[in-house]
Amino acid sequence: METIDTDSKGDVFLTEAGRKKLTAELDELKNVKRKEVAERLKNAISYGDLMENSEYDDAKNEQARVEHRIDQIETMLSRAKVIDRRHVKTKEIGVGSLVEIKQVGSGKKQEYRIVGPAEANPENHMVSFESPVGRALMGLKVGDTAMVSAPAGQIKYRVISIKR
């Protein structure tokens, strides 16, 4: 079961793209998935004897998952604080910042957008401000270094740039 990621005030931080993605998912769930599940339920009921009807059980479970996700997204969107990139500061790292960091020692550079937990996707270079990397970078300025605890040990990063 997924949880809703919020800060201590209950806010859910999203970029505009993240808000649009959640809105599209909500629309898909309400207007497509609900109908598909209802059709599956209708078909399963037509088989009779619901006590030993695995199709019915599967459809009911899917219905519960869809309704839970709809509720979850509606709650996130109602608590959403959309990050306006025009207001993201470039002097220090905060939510919404696009940061370039370099691993001290190896010289390996990486670029990440700092986002809220609901939108985090490290494979797409979107890290949560609550993740080990995000937490270590928050508030830093260009030239500052951060120590990040990783399974392989401590990794030291230097901030190369901060953009909107």
Image (cartoon, rainbow, N blue to C red):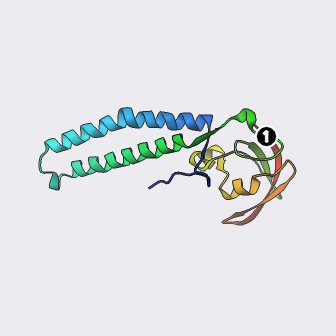
What residue lies at 60% left-to-right and 34% top-to-bottom?
17
9 sits left or right of 86 in the view = left
Q: In the rendering, at what x and y percent does residue 31 appear?
A: 37, 32
Instruction: Report the side of 27 relative to 97 (left or right).
Output: left
Disc 1 marks which residue? Answer: 89
Q: Where 153 falls versus 131 (above or below)? A: below
Residue sticking out furthest to the right: 143
Above or below, comparing residue 78 to residue 133 in the picture: above
| Residue 44 coordinates in the image, percent (x, y) | 19, 44
Above or below residue 34? Residue 12 is below
Write down the quadrant of residue 79 in the picture.
Answer: top right
Residue type marked 1: Lys
Number of numbered discs: 1
Q: Tell me what residue is drawn at x 52 percent, y 41 percent.
A: 78
Q: Residue furthest left?
A: 48
Toward the viewer: 98 or 64?
64
The quarter of the rendered structure image containing the N terminus is: bottom left
How far across and how far down the image is residue 70, in percent?
A: 42, 42
Looking at the rendered image, the quarter that the C terminus falls into is top right
Q: Position of residue 69 (x, y in %)?
A: 43, 46
**Element marked by disc 1:** loop
Residue occupying image coordinates x 71% and y 56% = 135
Which residue is nearer to you in this view: 145 or 83?
Answer: 83
Judged from this view, the residue extending furthest toward the front is 9
Residue 162 occupies which quadrant of the picture?
Answer: top right
Task: Looking at the picture, tell me which residue is in the foreground, 52 or 8.
Answer: 8
135 left or right of 69 in image: right
Residue neighbourhood size for the residue with mark 1, other residues' Cα within 10 Å, grouped as few (<14), some (14–19), many (≥20): some
